[in-house]
Image: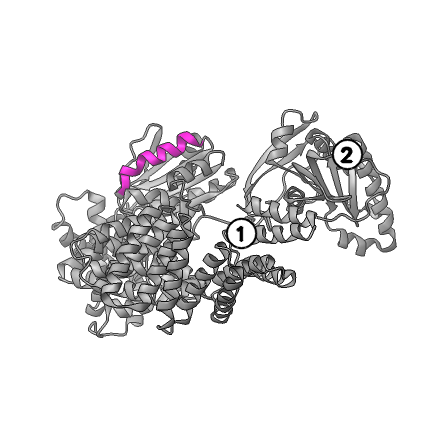
Amino acid sequence: MTASGVAAGRPDLPTGTVTFLFSDIEGSTRLLQALGDRYPTLLEQQADLVRAAIAEGDGVEVGTEGDSFFVVFPTPAGAVRTAVAIQRSLAAATWPDGSDVKLRIGIHTGEGHRGGDDYVGLDVHRAARIAAVAHGGQVLLSAETEALSGRALPDGVDLRDLGHHRLKDLDREERIYQLVIDGLPADFPPIRSLDAGRSHLPEPLTSLVGRGRQVDEVVRLVEESRLVTLTGPGGTGKTRLAIGAAERLRPAFVDGAFFVALDLVRETSLVASVVAGELGLVETRDRTPTEALTEHLRDRSVLLVLDNFEQILEAAPLVDGWLKASPKVKVLVTSRRPLRLYGERPYAVPPLHLPDLSGAAAPDQLRESGAVALFVDRARMARPGFEPTDDELRAIGAIVTRLDGLPLAIELAAARIKVLSPGALLTRLEHRLAVLSSGTAGLPDRQRTLRGAIEWSHDSLPEPERILFRRLSVFAGGCRIEAVEAVCDAAGEIGGDALDLVSALIDDSLLTRDDTADGEPRFRLLETIREYAAEQLVAAGEALEMAGRHAAYMADLAEALEPRLMGADRDASLARLTAENDNIRAVMRWSSTDGDTTPGLRTAAAIWRFWQQRSQIREGRAWLTSLLAKPDAAAEPLVHARAVTAAGGLAYWQGDMADAGRSYEVALAIDRGLGDRARIGDDLRNLGFIAMATRDMPAAVRLFGEAVEQLEATGDRFALAEARASYGVSLALSGDAEAARGYLEASCAVMLELGVLPRAADNSNALGIIYRRLGDTTLAIAMSRQALEIVQGLGDAIRTPFMLDSAAALALERDRTVDAVRLASAAAHLR
C-alpha cells in the first residue's frame, strides 16, 4: 500500500509490532456535491480534529489522501484511544450547513515492514480492508488488536464481537470486533464484508403457517440450551419448524446459522465430511474432517441445524464432541428419535392446532386453527382465488382433523382441491383412510395416518404417474429432467411425456421442484414420500432394474464430465457433480454392497479429481477400497485399471506415496496386458511423479521420458502435453534447463489452446523459473506474470502461493526488495 502526502521531516516510522489505523469519511462525494466550495472548510476541520486525536494517542501520520488518513501507533491502546477521541470529537462538532460527518475507522496490529517512507506487507492491506467494511461512525478492530487492547480500553468503551468475516483479496477469514462507545451510536447494519447478507439457511418455497407458538417455544429452548432435538414421525413439519426457528435465532449467532441436510447420509463416517463441506472447510492430508470442524468451531458463535439425524444416530458422539470443544456453538437437530446426549432438550413437535368442530364454532374460529389455515393456504396454491364458504370451512375442519393435523398429510390433501370440492374430498378421504388404516396395524397412530394420506394420494394417480412416482425414488437428492427420461422412461414404456407427468406430480404435491443457479431445475421427492415410493418400487419388482439404470446413467454422466474437470468449464462441471453428490453416493453404496460393481468403478474412476478438488479425498478412498475389494472388481480389465489409477491419484494427493505407487504399478501391469499405449503412458507418468516425490530424479526422468514415447503414438494432444511438461520439469530439476525449455513451451502452448488453464499456469510458472536460470529476464517476467494472471482469474488459492514464490525470487534477483517482500508475504499468508 502506498500513501500519498507524507510529511517531510517527520519522526522515524516505528517498526516491529505496530498498530495501523485507516479512516475516511463515509459519503464524502455526496458532501462535496452538497457543499461545493465550502467542502474544503469541512475537510480542514475534520483533519484538525483527527490530527489532535492522533497526537493524544502518540500516533505517527504516515499519509493522507483526500479525506482518508493512514496512521501508525507503537501500541494498540494508543490506536484505540485515538479512534475513540476521533468519534467523540466529530460527534460533538458543528459542521458547515448542518452536515453530518461520519468517519469509518479500521484498526489492525501486525508487523511494521518499512518500504522507504511507507509500510509494505499484508498487515497494512488487512487494516485497510477492515476500515473499508465499516460504516460511518463505526470503529472496527482485528482480533490481534482486540487481544492486545481488550483489557486496557478507555472508560466508557466496550467491545462487541462481530464474528468471522471474509474480506476482499484476503484468503484468511478475519475475526472482527466493534468498539461500543458510550453516548455514540452502537447499532449498525451488517458490515460490508464478502459475507454480508449471506444466509446459510435454505429459503423455503412455502410460508410457515400455523406454527407461531411452536417457533416461540423452540427459540426459547435454544436460548436456554445448547442442544435441542425436534422429534416426531415423518411429515410432522420438523424441518420447516427448525428453519423457522433458526431464521429467528440467526442474528444472535455472529458467525451464522448453517443448515446441514443429512437425510440421504447413511454412513456415520460421512457425517463430519458433510457438515464440514456445508461450512466450506477444506480437507487436508494432516487433519480429518472431524478435526477440521473441531478446530473451526472452537471460538465461533454458530448455530448448526442438523436435519434428519435418525438414520445416523451412531454419529451422536460427534455432536457431543463439537459442543464440548466449542462453547459458543449450539445445535438444533431434527430426528424421529432423540440423540440421547447429556444436556439434550428433546421437543416433540405437535400436530397443527385442530379446529373445534362443535356446532358452536364460528367460521372465524375455524380459520384461526393452524391446520385449517395451512389447508387453505396450500389450496390457494393449487387453485388460485380459492375462498371457502362457511360450509366448506367446516368440511376442511373435518379433513384436517381426520389427518390428525399432520402438515405433510394436509398439504397432500389440499393439492386435490384443484379437482375436488372440500365436501367431496372429505367423503373420499374418510372412506379411503378407513380402509387403509386397517392394513397398517402396528404403526403409531400419526404415522399410520400420514402413510394413509400418502397412499391415498398415490392411489388417486393415473397409472403412468404411479409408474414414474415409484421410479423417481431411485434418485437421491433429486435429478434433472433428462435424468428422469433416461432412467425412468428409457424406452418410453411409461406411456406419457415425462415432463407432463413430472408437472402432474408437482401439482399433486408429491414432487418438489428446486431452481438452481445454472437455470436447470431439479426435481425431488421429500424423503418421507420417497420412502413410500421406494416400497412401491420393490412391490412392482422394478427395484433392481431401476438401480442398475440409475447407476449406469450416473457412470455415463461422470465419464462425460471427466475431461472437463481440467478444462475451461471446470467450475461448471464441479458444480454439476456437487449437485449430484447424493446420487453419486447412492451409486457407490449400491455398487459396493449388493449391486453391480462396474458402474461404481466407472463412476469413481471418472470423478476422483472431483473428490480431490472438493476436499472429499478420504471419502473417495473409502469408496474405492470397498469397490476394489469385491470379487468381481477385475471383471472388466480397463475399468479395473482406471479405478486403480483413481485410487492411486487420491492416495498421492493425500501424501500416501507408498499406496499410490502400489496402485500405479498394478494399473501399469493391467494396461501392458491390454496393450493400451495411452493408458501405459499415463501410468508411467504417474509413477514418475512418485519418483519425483521420493527424490529419485534419475527414475523420474526415465519414467517421464518413456511416457512421452508412448503418448507420441496416440495422437492425444492433451495427454502428450501433460507428459512433455512433466518430462521438462524433471529435466530442469536434474540441471538441464535448456532441454526442459522446449518441452514446457510445447506443453504450455497446447494447454492455452485447449483452455486447460490450471496446467497452463503450472507450465508458465515452470518456464519463468527456467528462463531465469537461462538468464532471459524479459521472458521470465512475462511467464511469471502470465502464471499469476491465470491463477488469479481462476481463484485458485492452492496454486497461487507457488506462483507468488517464483515472482518473489525473480524480484529479489532484480534487487526489487520491497516487491519481493510483498510477494513472499502474500504467498506465506495464502499458504
Does residue 316 belong to the magenta stretch? yes
Task: Determine which of the numbered discs, if any, sits on residue 59 in the image.
Answer: 2
Spot occupied by residue 463 in the image (x, y as percentages of width and height): 19, 68
Q: Is residue 241 left or right of residue 671?
A: right
From the top left corner, tell me how far across and down residue 418 is, in percent.
31, 65
Front residue of 652/13: it is: 652
* Residue 540 image point, x, y percent: 14, 62
The residue depicted at 26 percent of the width and 48 percent of the height is 401
Instruction: State the image coordinates of residue 370 (x, y, percent, origin top left).
Output: 36, 47
User: In the rendering, which numbered label is found on residue 768?
Assistant: none
Indicate left or right for 41 with 164 as reference.
Answer: right
Q: Main secondary structure of the magenta part?
A: helix
Mark 2 burial class by Cα count in 10 Å: few <14, some 14-19, many 20+ = many
Q: Residue at x 54, y 58 (%)?
A: 765
Residue 122 colored in magenta in the image: no
Q: Nearer the viewer, mark 1 or mark 2?
A: 1
Q: Nearer the viewer, residue 312 or 18?
A: 18
Which residues lie in the magenta part? Answer: 312-326
Mark 1: secondary structure = helix
Q: Nearer the viewer, residue 620 or 259?
A: 620
The disc labelled 1 sits on which kind of residue?
Phe
Display colour scheme: one colour
The residue under label 2 is which amino acid type?
Gly
- Count of marks overlaid on the render: 2
Would residue 7 be seen by someone viewing this image from the given angle? yes
Residue found at x 40% / y 29%: 324
Q: Quadrant of residue 829?
A: top right
Residue linked to disc 1: 802
Q: Is residue 34 left or right of residue 780?
A: right
